[in-house]
Amino acid sequence: MRITTISPHDSLGPELLALQHAAYAVEAELIGDDRIPPLHESLEGLRSEPLTWLGTFDGERLVGAVAWEETPDEVDVNRLVVHPEEHRRGIGRALVEEVMARAGGRRIIVSTGRDNKPARTLYERLGFRPRREHEVIPGLWIASYLYERTTRDRPRGDAQG
């Protein structure tokens, strides 16, 4: 498995969009609601988002991706998608861990469908703390998480603390 920077603006764009649609179709089934905006996004819409992307490849095939926005203080994980045929292979975990490593000491936020138990379990196992649950549109609930690196999470010899 190889993780590398990708872009929806190059020839990989249609493959990334198809992966996103397949992954969010699974989430829609889990939460019982298909009104998840990325599930219905067009290629132009995907390309218009100001996101940084990483992709995971099995050979030449894109099997997972993560995208985020960042500020000097915070990283907001906007999307995490894994091909439905590749679930439970550690792809999502590896992608989130890579974002965590790139975030340095910044806090990380992420949201997922309130009833998406697999995603919630992943974030909780990686040390994300639940922040809140809220209704984004009538009947569609999401759960938000926060990760803040603690002193014990820092590498030895790191004077920050």
Image (spheres, rainbow, N blue to C red):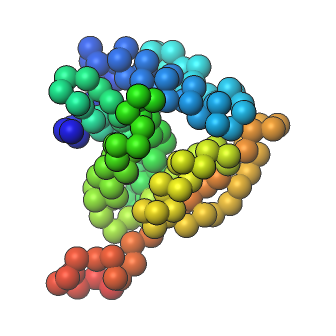
Q: Quadrant of the N terminus?
A: top left
**Residue at x 26% of width, y 14% of height:** 11
Task: Residue lying at the far right in this picture: please name it.
Answer: 138
Q: Is residue 48 visible?
A: no
Quick check: 159 above or below 37? below
Q: Tally the numbered discs.
A: 0
> In which quarter of the view is residue 153 placed?
bottom left
Task: Estimate the x, y position of residue 27 in percent, counting from the top left.
Answer: 59, 34
Q: Is residue 44 visible?
A: yes
Task: Estimate the x, y position of residue 129 in percent, counting from the top left.
Answer: 55, 67
Q: Quadrant of the C terminus?
A: bottom left
Task: Estimate the x, y position of residue 3 in percent, counting from the top left.
Answer: 22, 40
Quick check: 111 above or below 48? below
Please name whichever residue, 117 or 65, is drawn nearer the observer in this view of the structure.
Answer: 117
Quick check: 145 above or below 158? above
Q: Is residue 128 left or right of residue 132?
A: left
Q: Is residue 96 left or right of residue 117?
A: left
**Residue at x 31% of width, y 49% of height:** 94
**Residue at x 64% of width, y 37% of height:** 30
**Residue at x 64% of width, y 31% of height:** 28
> In which quarter of the view is residue 31 placed?
top right
Please name whichever residue, 68 or 153, is drawn nearer the observer in this view of the structure.
Answer: 153
Q: Is residue 3 left or right of residue 38?
A: left
